[in-house]
Image: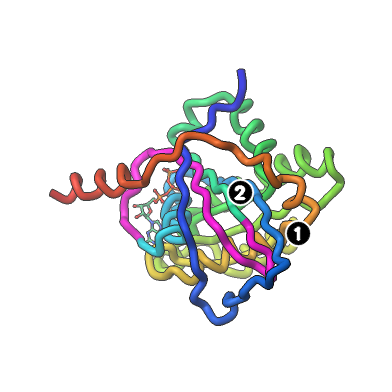
């Protein structure tokens, strides 16, 4: 059975952080990359993704599954990111082969844990080794991965130190960020911007023209759910 792709949604994006105001010249390359957001349940995968895409934090995200398409300009390269956020309830209902297929689909990975949840941190080394074995075996190229410690605002509940996160990222040759999707947009922007910087041109160029062309639906369902819940 083939890989079941979720609904697809497009967004537009203009970076507003001074460090990110890199206007592409007339020869800027247009490229595409697939990003898979992974991690344990309840760590804030959807919050981080939605914060990056919309700048908003809506609190509850339900179990909607989307691939979001979003333009980002990094180092003069205009990159169309296809970001797949998989709810953990769905992951648990599947067999391992679906995760393998998603890993094959992706060129780059965001691995999220909560700084308040030791177990969500402890599962990362195995997940990352699994990704590396699946991807690096094929291409011999380093796989772009960033590790994200989320919920930084809950410092009184912290059980994973920043140093532990940084060391893990160093030992596995990944990028590292600590953020609060709840508190600020900037951290989410830095995560996806940092990831895009790690994707080599060769990988991006290879993806050009091979992106999925699926059904485009709006994220209004997520916001509608939120509005209904708060009535
Ligand atoms: N305090 C705080 N809460 C957060 C933050 N990010 C997410 N949350 C909350 O954590 C809960 C889980 O967030 P989600 O984004 O749904 O987490 P997820 O990893 O996508 O969850 P699954 O659907 O289980 O895969 C929600 O109640 C969010 O409001 C954060 O940075 N700080």
Mark linked to residue 173: 1
Q: Give the image location of residue 126, x and y in percent.
A: 68, 43
Q: Residue furthest bottom?
A: 18
Q: Secondary structure at mark 2?
A: strand
Residue in the picture at 65% in, 43% down:
106
Residue 35's tag is 2
Name the residue at 48% across, 71% down: 186
93 vs 16: above or below: above
Disc 1 residue lies near ligand 1 with CB under 8 A: no
Specify the quadrant of the image occupied by residue 156: bottom left
Q: Secondary structure at mark 1?
A: loop
The crowd level at tag 1 (other Cα within 10 Å; few <14, some 14-19, many 20+) is: some
Please provide percent x and percent y for residue 165: 62, 63
> Which residue: 44% across, 50% down?
46
Residue 67: in magenta span: yes
Q: Residue furthest left?
A: 231
Which residue sits at x=31%, y=56%?
58
Q: Nearer the viewer, residue 79 or 99?
A: 79
> Where residue 174 sits in the image (x, y, percent)?
71, 59
Q: Is residue 111 located in the magenta-colored stretch of the structure?
A: no
Give the Cα separation between the discs numbered 1 and 2.
18 Å
Does residue 21 lie above or below 87 as drawn? below
- Image quarter (top left, top right, bottom left or bottom right) of the N terminus: top right
The region drawn magenta spans 57-79
Q: Is residue 184 left or right of residue 104?
A: left
């Amino acid at each position: 059975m083939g890989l079941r792709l979720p609904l697809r949604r497009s967004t537009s994006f203009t970076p507003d952080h001074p460090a990110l105001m890199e206007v592409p010249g007339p020869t800027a390359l247009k490229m595409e990359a697939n990003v898979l957001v992974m991690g344990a349940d309840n760590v804030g995968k959807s919050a981080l993704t939605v914060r990056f895409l919309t700048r908003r934090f809506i609190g509850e995200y339900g179990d909607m599954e989307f691939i979001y398409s979003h333009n980002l300009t990094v180092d003069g390269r205009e990159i169309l990111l296809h970001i797949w956020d998989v709810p953990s309830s769905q992951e648990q209902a599947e067999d391992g082969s679906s995760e393998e297929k998603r890993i094959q689909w992706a060129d780059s990975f965001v691995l999220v844990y909560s700084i308040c949840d030791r177990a969500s941190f402890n599962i990362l080394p195995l997940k990352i080794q699994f990704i590396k074995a699946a991807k690096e075996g094929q291409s011999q190229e380093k796989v772009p991965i960033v590790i994200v410690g989320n919920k930084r605002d809950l410092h009184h509940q912290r059980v994973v130190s920043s140093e532990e996160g940084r060391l893990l990222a160093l030992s596995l040759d990944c990028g590292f960020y600590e953020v609060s999707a709840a508190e600020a947009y900037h951290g989410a922007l830095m995560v996806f911007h940092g990831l895009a910087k790690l994707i080599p041109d060769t990988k991006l160029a290879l993806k050009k023209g091979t992106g999925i062309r699926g059904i485009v639906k709006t994220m209004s369902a997520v916001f509608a759910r939120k509005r209904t819940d708060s009535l």
